[in-house]
Image (cartoon, helix red, strand yellow):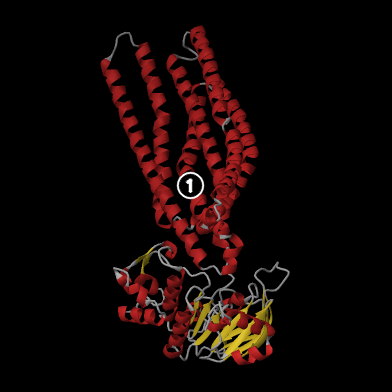
Amino acid sequence: MLKTLLKSVRQYLASTILTPIFVTFEVILEILIPKVISNMINVLQNSTDVNFSVIGAYGGILLSMAILSLVFGMLSGMFAARASSGFARNLRHDLFAKIQTYSFKNIDKFSVSSLVTRLTVDIFYIKDAYQYVIRIAVRSPIMLICALIMSFTVNSVFSFVFLGLLVFIGIGIFLMLFFALPSFKKAFHRYDLLNNDIQENIKGIRVVKSYVKENYEIGKLSESSKNLAKNFLKAETIMSFAMPMMQFAMYTSMTFICALGSYIIVDSFGLNLNVGQLQELTTYGMQILSSLMMFSMVFVMISMAAECAVRCVEVLKEEPDIANPENPIFEVKDGSISFDKVFFKYSEKAEKYALNDINLTIPSGSTVGIFGATGSSKSSLVNLICRLYDVSEGSVKVGGVDVKDYDLKTLRDQVAVVLQKNVLFKGTIKDNIRWGNENATDEEIVEVCKLAEASEFIEQFKDGYDHMIEQGGSNVSGGQKQRLCIARALLKKPKVLILDDSTSAVDTKTDYKIRLSFKNYIPSTTKIIIGQRISSLQDSDMIIIMNDGMIQQVGTHEELLKTNKIYQEVYNSQNRVGGDGNE
């Protein structure tokens, strides 16, 4: 896991290495300062007259050491911040880049809300833990070991007191972590559920408001927040005992050392222990205990970040189930498509196939309509053509070549899909259309918008094609969004064009004009149209009737009207007075 995560350090390796180096120098100076103070006290105590030159000399040394310690501390802090922020930046980039290689199946495995949590909350905790590890986790043990060694050089009896405290505090920290870690682990899974509720609510905010369900959604989110807070409260309540335990150990040990030390000084007239040495022991005791406190904080941070690290590594190590072959083909000959004994299910654990024994041949340049009830797997069928999913059994060929043998970019450039859920991104209309071809000229953009019947409403905007689209296309209507997405797909000039119910929000007249544009502009492109309106499909060279993941019948509009009862009923219901497409 660490090996995988540390690959994201890259250009911040120097900052990562410099941080513990400066921390070490800082600690060495802090360890030496009590020794210098002890010597100064002893010199002054043994001197009969006040020697200002001695005070000045020691003061200068102490001031220089303090300034150097401050400088080293500031440098270690600066490099630690740079290293941890840079590491988090690279890790976030690596995770996001990895997700871009995922197929729909990979994304379904994690869920969108979980991936968002890993890219945000999890990386935040990992960043903090990384900074603690390269700075505090280096400082604490060095400080602890050096202070313990120095205390032994002063008085071994008192040093054993410190060792006893180490054992006591170590057991306490172990027990706290043992009981707190499970709650921390549960908390991060709660984040996924919380993000899922937020995402679902915001995406469906129009429905929420239409049904006046704001209070219901607030209650649902409150419950998720309550469960998350409950997990963190339990874990943090357990960890809150760390500070009182440390303070108890610190003040108990200091009281013991001061009382016993004072007695030894008085009893031995300073021969076994002097005032300077007592001050030195007291300081080293404080340093030992403070380093233990910092060390416990590091353990807490690492413990919290450990589960986050596991979740991030899961994303990085997940292998896309759809990838380029070793020797990919970079040319799609034509738009012919064939399905040969195709079976498909979304998960290996699924009991039922979404597609069953699909055998189909589509000639290049033909127009194909796909019709069927909701849930008949129409979208599942076309998703296999551009390898958004891979078949479970059988094969799908485009241009006479198995889609698994193509270079993915080549295949998807030549198989354009306007998905059922149309998505526009924040930016100008031009920016969104150029997703189809980033090098397209303004004239080409205008041309495809005319073909998609989008130019008319675009020209009504004050800034025309430079009109800014808000995130998700929230400032355009459903029909306008669909037409912009169709224009974007046309700009690719593909061998195969798939419209997955992509004209459902436009009127029948506009729908007809769009299909007529396809016929004239891209006659050699294979056009696959999924629709619920028979008027959108009736001019197709063939219409595929799907039912329960199987092809029920294939034929022309006229053939199906004569032989398919379901097709007849839908056609008659849509074409009687008041029906859809009253023509």
Q: Measured from the top left, where is residue 515 in percent x and y?
A: 47, 85
Residue 205 drawn at (x, y percent):
51, 56
Residue, far front: 577
Circle 1 — which element?
helix
Question: Looking at the image, which is closer to me, 508 or 501?
Answer: 508
- Residue lying farthest to the left in this orientation: 53
Q: How many marks?
A: 1
In-front residue for pair 258/2: 2
Q: Would you identify the image quadrant in which residue 405 lies?
A: bottom right
Q: In the rendering, at what x and y percent does residue 374 appear? A: 63, 73
User: Which residue corresponds to mark 1?
Assistant: 130
Residue 560 occupies quadrant? bottom right
Mark 1, Cα crowd under 10 Å, few <14 / some 14-19 / many 20+, is many
Split into 4 quadrants, where in the image is the N terminus? bottom right
Does residue 482 sit above or below 402 in this rendering?
above
Residue furthest out toward the right: 351
**Picture residue at 51% right of the left edge, 37% below the top:** 141
**Left or right placement of residue 90 versus residue 458 in this view:** right
Residue at point 54%, 76% (across, down): 500
